[in-house]
Structure formats: C-alpha cells, structure tokens
Amino acid sequence: MTTSKRSLRTCSNGHEYYKSSECPVCPTCEQERKPIDGFLAKLSAPARRALEHHDITTLQQLATFSEKEILQFHGIGPASMPILRASLEESGLSFTQ
C-alpha cells in the first residue's frame, strides 16, 4: 500500500493544514463556513459546494432542477439525493420532471 505525500499548506486566513491531494480547500475554513441549519447543513462539504457553485442556496432554487441535472454536478452523489428529496418534501416541494 502506497501512501501519498502530504504537504503542509497555509490558507489565506493563516490556517496551516496538510493535504495529499491538489484540493485547495482548507479544512478549518470549510468547517467554519458550514451552515448550522437548513438543508445545506445536512450535506457533505463537496455536495454543499457543488450546489453553492451553481447558486443553489434555497429549496425553492433547488426545486427548479431535475434529479438528473443535480446528479450531474461534480460533488453530488447518490447519497445526497435522499437528503435533498426529504428536504424538498418537508417544504412541500419536489424536483422538476
């Protein structure tokens, strides 16, 4: 089993962290910006960033997309879909067809 070489990095906010991938996300900054409540708080960080990248921050915005469209976003996987469906249903909304 080979291990990836981890490099020490410093984000623009001064947090130091180790990463073995090319991902530029600082874990400390990501934890600090995670929502406390709402449907985005229930998602993994990659899924949340994928929706935010497409300017989807409310359930009303999410409801304008189909499941197929959402699954095409980089960072959204099958595990995110039940969470999104349930959040929409709780608000009386659903994905478009």
Image (spheres, helix red, strand yellow):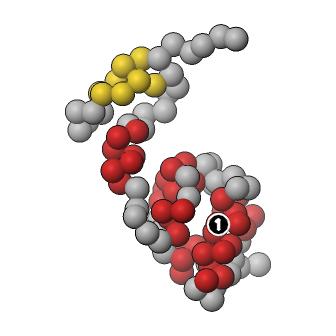
Q: Position of residue 65 (x, y in %)?
A: 65, 72
Which residue is situated farthest in the bottom direction here? 92
Camera-side residue of 49 and 38: 38
Q: Is residue 67 above or below residue 27?
A: below
Can the viewer see residue 56 in this picture?
Answer: no
Q: Is residue 32 left or right of residue 43?
A: left
SS class, disc 1: helix
- Residue type indicated by callout 1: Ile
Neighbor class of circle 1 (other Cα within 10 Å; few <14, some 14-19, many 20+) is some
| Placement of the C terminus among the 4 image quadrants | bottom right
Q: Is residue 77 above or below residue 95?
A: above
Q: Position of residue 68 (x, y in %)?
A: 75, 64
Q: Is residue 4 left or right of residue 65?
A: left
Q: Position of residue 19 (x, y in %)?
A: 45, 25
How many dots with numbers? 1
Can the viewer see residue 68 in this picture?
Answer: yes
Q: Residue at x 62, y 78 (%)?
A: 88
Q: Residue at x 66, y 59 (%)?
A: 80
Q: Residue at x 51, y 50 (%)?
A: 45
To which residue does mark 1 refer? 83
Q: Position of residue 85 (x, y in %)?
A: 68, 73
Q: Is residue 34 above or below residue 37?
A: above
